[in-house]
Amino acid sequence: DPTTGEKAVKGDAVTLLVSLGKPTVPSLDGLTNPDDYNKALSERSLVGEEGETVYSDNVPQGQIASVTPSPHTMVNVNSTVTYHLSQGPAPVNVPNVHNTKADEAKQQLQQLGFNVKVENKFDDSVKGNYAIGTSPDAGSQATRGSDITLYVSTAVEIPDLAGVSEEAARDQLAKAGIRVESVTRSGDSDAVGKSANDVYITNPQAGTLIDSSQTTVTIELVNKVEVPNVIGKRLSEARTILQDAGFKVKAPSSANSNSRVIYQSPSFLSEESPETRVELRTLN
């Protein structure tokens, strides 16, 4: 400067412009803001151009996610560098976790990048501690890092108590958090058990899903009891067996506790109502 071919007065200064070589595409480190990046391009005699937006899990929406050519690439002066702004994370299909164990459903959603909030609610079609569904619903799209609500059922299943004693039934129901409203004797003639305290059925029935905070259970005991066989047993043992089954006992006043039973009425395996008197005869 002055340029080649121009005339200059002796003694004037001539400036030599030393080449820095070809410019390189600026790095994105600290320059993801479009205005800042365009300024960096201009300083290197390059031209910035906005291209199509792209999804990015790491770059906030509106910031530069990538450039073409890639950073540090050597290009000619006045070359165009295309930069692509981030749309934020790509949307993800919300999976169907209905009837999945709550822990497994939560883990599945977290692995997709969602922030999971668990909300408990009653559902009479889904077992307790299993997933009812989500909000947003399954099949809809949501972005990674967004909040999603997982609904978990609080339903309690009525256990099958047929044949167990009233005491054992009460214990099982209490452990399940189910309250017993009442205990009644069944009116069904087919309700036969080994003991007067045996459970025949519950209402609601076994397998029903209930809201234990709202629903109580009625226990129905058997209507009739099979008379046990006490022939050949000592009187004291026979009396205990029959009374435990719910029967009354009539024995000869002359018999002692070690007397052997040789006769009983009603006969064994017959079906009688609780509190029926069983007559015994013994061999003194």
Image (cartoon, rainbow, N blue to C red):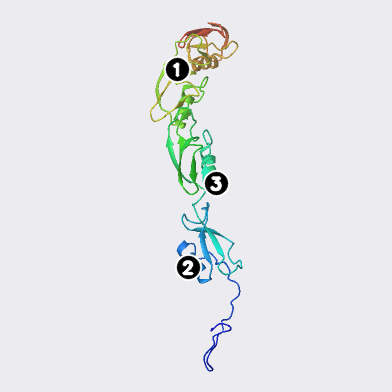
Instruction: Select label 2 or label 3 by which is in front.
Output: 2
Give the CA separation, mark 2 to mark 3: 39 Å
Position of 219 with respect to 82 (left or right) is: left
Q: Earlier in the sequence, mark 1 or mark 2?
A: 2
Give the CA separation, mark 1 to mark 2: 84 Å
**Vertical placement of residue 122 versus 112, above or below:** above
> On the image, numbered disc 2 is attached to which residue?
39
Q: Earlier in the sequence, mark 2 or mark 3?
A: 2
Residue type indicated by callout 1? Glu
Toward the viewer: 107 or 190?
Answer: 107
> On the image, numbered disc 3 is attached to which residue?
111
**Quadrant occupied by the N terminus:** bottom right
Residue 101 image point, x, y percent? 53, 37
Residue type indicated by callout 3? Gln
Give the CA separation, mark 3 to mark 1: 48 Å
Give SS at disc 3.
helix
Instruction: Select label 3 or label 1 by which is in front.
Output: 3
Toward the viewer: 175 or 113?
Answer: 113
Residue type indicated by callout 2? Lys
The residue drawn where x is 54% and y is 60% is 82
Residue 115 image point, x, y percent? 47, 47
**Vertical placement of residue 258 versus 38, above or below:** above
> On the image, numbered disc 1 is attached to which residue?
220
**Quadrant occupied by the C terminus:** top right
Q: Circle 3: is it few (<14), some (14-19), or many (20+) Cα within 10 Å? A: few
Give SS at disc 1.
strand
